[in-house]
Amino acid sequence: MLKTEAVELALKLKVLDKRMMKEIEISALEVGHYVVKIVKQVKQFTLTQPGHIKSDLVIKNMAAKGVISLLIDTSKTKKEHHPRKNKNAPVIMDVYKAKELFTQSKAIQKQVFSDAQSGKPLDLSPVEKITDETINEIFKNPDALACVINIRNTDEYLLEHSVSVSVLMTIFARFLKVEKPIIQELSIGAFLHDVGKIMVPENILNKPGKLTTEEFSIMKTHVNHSIDIIKKTPGISALSLEVAALHHEKLDGNGYPFNVVGDDISTYGRMISICDIFDALTANRCYKKGYNHIKAFNILRKLAESNHLDQRLVNLFIKCMGVYPVGSLVELNSNKIAIVEERNIDDPTNPKVRYFYNSEKNNYVMAEDIDLAKNDDFIVKGVRADDFDLNMNKIIEFLLMQG
């Protein structure tokens, strides 16, 4: 080919390439479009990489993130789209709705704390409504909300902890086949269990180091405050009050505030203690990183051996959550970082995972589903996003983009 012909062809291809590029509004974005970049937005959402839109949830997520318009490559649009059936869809596809539910719960929790601080009686109706919605969602898909618990803001621990304990209590109670009306009472009690912390001075509540004996005595009063506030709440049930009152009691009688011993602690009181401690262990806070799930499970087992927690219920809780809980991250022998998407009931140490990151090269890769029960690769250890300077929110967004 002559040089002039090559130049002409290159120019034509460049013009053709430009014609293939089209800016569209987010409302016109469809499954199958190939997004090159975001053009206009009201926030700071970034694409991890260009790619095809795999589901409507991806579009909803981008709209929620403030995306106004995008540049698409029309030559790469996929005409056919074959969505997975719900039965086999990865849990990540249900996370968007679960995140919205979690956000709504936090807003209600914030109002609860505000009312408690100002001395107003708590309005139970929004708490009943959101816990009922959460219970229904958990009965449909407990894994999506379990996954969302891993996406936390370090500066919102107080709000998120109460919501998360309520979610964990619901998941655990469902696993134990507790009747649904009772589950709601348990969920409400868990939702309100730490409301008394609003009465604890902030310098003690958020102290990064170990509390002094005097400071710890003040911290322990939060349960008494919670009991007083919940008692005054119109329409509250005795069971909701019970689980909130017992969440720091220990079987050996060295818990607080009432030093309740052994058989006097109900099954539900024992359950909330496990959920409360597990969430506290795994959550990131402004002054400390949370433990991975395996480490947290080991601590729960040791507390059971010391007669602080109910050993039978601790074992059932671990079985409920799974050796590697859905939504947790794992490092594989092949240096792959993956999110746990589904348990293998017959082989709990080898779940189904979705690989998305190469820890050796420190880069995101095209997501790939791996059933470890049928693969030579295996889990080396459970990890956290911040072990690799990653952000769980960005991981979830990347996986949503992958479909």
Image (cartoon, helix red, strand yellow):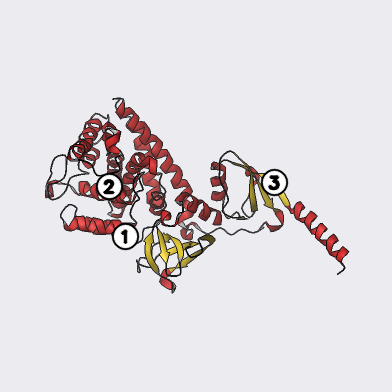
Task: Say which label, 2 or 3, has the lower sequence index.
Answer: 3
Circle 3: residue type: Glu
Point out the image quarter for the N terminus. Answer: bottom right
- 200 or 173: which is nearer to us? 200
Q: CA distance from mark 3 to mark 1?
A: 47 Å
Do tag 2 and tag 3 residues touch (Cβ < 8 Å)? no
Identify the element where label 2 is drawn: helix
Image position, residue 173 (x, y; %): 28, 50
Image position, residue 318 (x, y; %): 29, 58
Circle 1: residue type: Ile
Image position, residue 24 (x, y; %): 68, 45
Identify the element where label 1 is drawn: helix
Position above or below: 259 against 141: above
Q: Is residue 161 found left or right of 229 in the rendered image?
A: right
Q: CA distance from mark 2 to mark 3?
A: 49 Å
Q: Quadrant of residue 295?
A: bottom left
Q: Which mark is residue 294?
A: 1
Q: CA distance from mark 2 to mark 1?
A: 16 Å
Q: Nearer the viewer, mark 2 or mark 1?
A: 1
Image position, residue 60 (x, y; %): 55, 45
Circle 2: residue type: Asp
Do tag 3 and tag 1 residues touch (Cβ < 8 Å)? no
Point out the image quarter for the C terminus. Answer: bottom right
Identify the element where label 3 is drawn: strand
* Location of mark 2 (residue): 276
* Location of mark 3 (residue): 23
Is residue 9 among the parts visible in the rendering?
A: yes
Task: Say which residue appears at 28% left-offset and 58% top-offset.
Answer: 297
